[in-house]
Image (cartoon, rainbow, N blue to C red):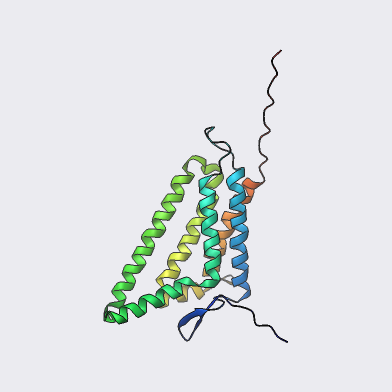
Amino acid sequence: MMLELTMLAEVVEGRWRLGIGDPTLIGWVTVVAYLVAALGTFWAAWREPRTDNKHPNRPATFWLVLCALLVALGINKQLDLQTLVTEIGRDSIRAWGMYQQRREIQVGFILVVALICVAAVAGFFWFARRALRYRWLALLGTVFIFGFVLVRAASFHRVDAFLAARIGGMRWNWVLELGGISAVAVAAFRIARIRPPRPRSRRTEG
C-alpha cells in the first residue's frame, strides 16, 4: 500500500494550495542548508568572544536574530508564502476594481519590500559593528540572501528569466541564495569552533 506524503505548499493552475513548493533536489538541499546555517548561528551566539565584560554569559543578539531569520526562510522555502501573499493581493485588487493599476501597485509593493530589506541589512550592520572581525562574512551572506528575497519579490518576466539563467551550470537564484547561506554558515561555524576561555581560579587567602 502506497502512502501519500503530506505536502507543504504548491502552486496549481496559478493558485496557491497546501503542498510542496519546491520538491526538487536543490529545493530540499536549500532547506537543509538553511537549517544547518541556523544551527551554526545559534551555536555562534553563545560561543562568540564578547567585546565587553558587561554580560559575558549573554548570547549575542546578532546571531540569534540571524538564526530566527534563517529558520523562517527555510520553512518558507517549501511553504512558498510569498505566492500566497501575491495571490491574495491580486484578488483584492480585482475586488476593489483597481486591476488596471496593478503595475503601479506592484511597483509600490516592490519598493516597500526593498525598503524592508535595506532596513534589515542596516540593522544587521548596526548589531555587527562592534564585532566585524567575526561577523563580516555573515553580513556578506545576509546581503546575498536579502538580495535574493528582493529579486524574487519583483516577479517580473525579465527578473524570472535572469534567475533561470545559468552561470557555469548554476542558476543565478542558486548562486544568490545558496551562496548567501554558505557564507553565513562558514562564519558561524568558525566561531563555534572557538574554545571558550577557561575560568580563572580564585586564589585562596592565606
Question: From the image, which quarter does the C terminus lie in?
Answer: top right
Q: Which residue: 52% across, 62% down?
A: 72
Q: Position of residue 166 (x, y in %)?
A: 54, 73
Residue placed furthest toward the top: 206
User: As drawn, is 71 to the left or to the right of 123?
Assistant: right
- Number of marks present in the image shown: 0
Residue furthest to the right: 1
- Seen at 62% across and 65% down, the residue is 32
Splitting the image into 4 quarters, where does residue 104 fall?
A: bottom left
Q: In this orientation, which residue lies closer to the viewer: 175 or 4? A: 4
The residue positioned 45% from the left and 71% from the top of the image is 82
Q: Residue at x 67, y 46 (%)?
A: 193
Residue 140 visible (yes or no)? yes
Q: Is 39 rendered above or below residue 51?
A: below
Taking the image as drawn, is residue 156 in sight?
no
Q: Is residue 91 above or below residue 35?
A: below
Residue 75 position, x and y percent, is 55, 66
Quadrant containing the N terminus is bottom right
Q: Position of residue 192 (x, y in %)?
A: 64, 47
Give the image location of residue 21, x and y in percent: 54, 76
Judge by depth and name the residue closer to the eye, 152 or 64.
64
